[in-house]
Image: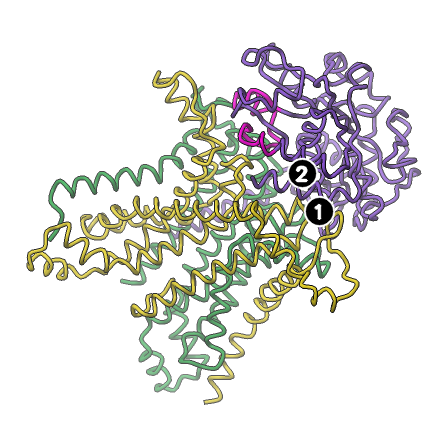
Chain colours: A yellow, B purple, C green
Amino acid sequence: MSAPRRRSSSLLLPTWLVLGVFFLVPLLLMLGISFAQRGVYGGLKPIADLAGYLRSGDFLANYARSFDGIFLKIAWRSLWMAVATTGLCIVVSFPIAYYLALLAPQRWKGLLLGLVVIPFWTSFLIRTYAWMFILRTEGLLNLVLVGSGLLHHPVELLYTQTAVMIGLVYGELPFMILPLYASLEKLDRSLLEAGSDLGAGRVETFRRVTFPLTLPGLAAGIVLVFIPSLGQFVVSDLLGGARSMLLGNLIQNQFAVARNQPFGSALAFELTAIVLLLLLGYAALARRRGGEDLL
Amino acid sequence: MKKIAILMTLALLAVACGGGKGSKPSGKVVNIYIWTNYLPQEVVDEFERRTGIHANVDTFDSNEAVLAKLQSGVAGYDVAVPSDYMLKILIPQGLVQPLDHGRLPHLKNLDPRFLNQKYDPGNGHSVPYLWGTTGIGYDQKKIQPPVDSWAALFEPRHAGRILMLDDQREAFGAALRLMGKSVNEKDPAILRQAAERLKKQKPLVRTYNSSDFANLLAAGDVDLSQGYNGELAEAVAKSSGRLAYVIPKEGGTLWIDNLAIPKGARNLDAAYAFLDFVMLPEIAARIVNHVHYACANRAALPLIDAKIKADPSIYPPQEILKRCELIEDLGETTQLLDQLWTEVKAQ
Amino acid sequence: MTPGRGARRLLAAHTGLVYLFLYAPIAILMVFSFNAARQTAFWEGFTFDWYRRLLDDGLLLHALRNSLEVAGVTTAAAVLLGTPAALALARPAFRGKRATQTLLYLPVIIPEVVLGAALVTFFGAIHWQLSIATVVIAHVVFSVSYVALVVRARLAGIDPALEEAARDLGAGPFETFRRVTLPLALPGIVASALLVFTLSIDDYVITSFVAGVGATTLPLHIYSMLKVGVTPEVNAVSTLLLAVTIVLIAAAHRLLQEKEN
């Protein structure tokens, strides 16, 4: 009995070492820094009296500041953007997932599915750039709209909230289609038939049989789309014109140009906390329904 | 499929290992951190040809980025190019090294008017590189009457057609000048008022950008752009009279960018070699002719393009220079400004 | 109960539109990488110029080399660390199994901004100069989990009776691993290796925090190209990167499917 256990620990030791040193330690360090203050030009302000600093509650200053109106607004903006992105993704993904899982001809299924998987793995940066190229004032969209005479003036879509929305939905779409597809694929057709045998119309069957059975896939998709959307900063930077600051931008900004690592660290942990809470909620839900693994 | 994947990977490896001018590992290297659009690739190549030292060039578009990198202590740059006021911050913090003028024989080529400035007495830690002004570039055909005030960037009728530099000192500078104050204002109350102006302006601004503003103006993505004179002058020259550059009547900023060696630079010899190389008259002239910014090199003047020398945006006359202010370090107030700028951007 | 013909056609049409939405931008990028026009999307003639310029672009090739080096080392390290971890996790419960599982899930869950920020803070604190090594370390941190989880999923599908049979026939633990477990797990290992390689090549966010000077990877280089002004060269580089990724992923997909049958 001791042999397998010994083996397990030696198998896991390298991983624990690497992740321990280069993952856990940095996170703990950042947590510690989130309780410090920034110096005049950046860096850390030396704390003369540690006990007094802790007692006075000053060490929570960064967390307190993050609840200022201005930053709450950013959190709110990030939140509703993530919700809107997720919502749009669901609306767009459900029909296609349904078609692929239940209606597509068998011989095409593999190929069609592969075609959804591919964007899933290509560079997010490049796919965001594609929209920069299309939406610019001298980009393809305006070329087509103005050139064909549909519009007299180019439409300014780049550097707007709309552009960010398009970029986000475009980037996250495959992450919603695939889990929904997986769920629908496993659907027992006989259940659907039973529904109609019992006299339910098509819509009612969908509402009472199909939809509830896809909830695990839907939940997984929501997690896979909502969480990255919440923390992203590339799309809002490139397509938003450095105008609409989201949480991800704010954090990156604090670690770069604004040189306020303590504040940035506090924000980073708050974002992580939100993400972990959401995931714990999802895990609890999944466990209740009989456990469907995230990956 | 698998075979194609393997073949592709091998092909990529072959190309990457064999090709590219920048891949000769001669052992000698210099790591440079400089503004975007500030160092032509041909000059870098010439440096490599003459000295055998390979130059890694990273770019930034704000002084605060330089400060952040040098403060981290692990960025590994041998040469950095901060502006005047940023040097004033870097030197007392010990983030840049004292310079040994003995290793810079071509220092004598520089114009004495740019030497021995307040932010670096005796040029103990830096040598001037290029200098310029910040003003407004705009589309003359679309914007009437001709722009002559910072107010143009704050006017509601230009909503969505304005570009501001993504730079806290320059953005606040515009607001403060409009309020009749100095760009080096330290009074917190006044700074907060300026911040309010910038916050109110934000819905009118299409984008904040410090590296692509000239292209965006030329492409018609914006009609008014706060920007640096060199890149805007280049765009103006290429626009056949459509674009214009102006330093507003309230005054603009004048800045001098300097070459410095960060503390802890590992390739000291290479750094000095680069600094000296750039002060050669023909090299300095090549840089100016390419990037369209004025240099502090007197010996290079005869070699600079006549059109550039005659361009009042690049070599402004005295009465315009008098309107401009050098940005200075704000000391303790820096923290407030960082905070206010974050608030403006977070809006 | 299946949707009527009208609904079916609607769903098919919607599906077609979604595919169009997914691939049109990519196709547009690729097509316009051959456009002779510099600034506008107006078609001014077909040309290979931009690709030719890529070959001359020392900085870009240097970035490409960095990306390949980083991806290669990362993949190797991730596989060497993740495969044993997967083996351990495939075993029945042992002390610390829950903790290990949590540890492996975390790098995948934590937002990239947070991970990047934490790492750059860490390297700064211990005065470890940013370089290509710090990029590799960062990539390995998020890659190990993918290997471990994918291989574990693969191992879960293997009939334990096979390993038992090998042991009954007298094979020692290492030999069982070499002759039974490893070959069966191999498709999972290779597939996860391809995936990790792709993720590493395409990573921007985390790399942007920890890359040192001279360690610019391809995505970082592309990003700085985007900041200074969009030219068709960016299209050309994007097209190449997309093509490589597509081939690698298709290969991984095929591999996993092949071995299923």
Residue A265: x, y in percent?
61, 56
Residue beneath disc 2: B60
Position of residue B170 relative to residue A194, above or below, is above
Q: Disc 2 vs disc 1: Cβ atoms closer than 8 Å?
A: yes
* Amino acid found under the numbered disc labelled 1: Lys
The extreme bottom residue here reads A1
Q: Quadrant of residue A211?
A: bottom left
Q: Is residue B301 magenta?
A: no
Disc 2 packing (10 Å; few <14; some 14–19; many ≥20):
some
Whether residue B161 is visible to the viewer of this picture, yes or no, is yes
Disc 1 packing (10 Å; few <14; some 14–19; many ≥20):
some
Give the chain letter at badge 1: B
The label shown at residue B15 is: none
Residue C113: x, y in percent?
55, 52
Q: Is residue A252 left or right of residue A122?
A: right
Position of residue C104 relative to residue B144, above or below, is below
Magenta stretch in the rendered image: B199-225
Secondary structure, mark 1, is helix
The label shown at residue B69 is: 1
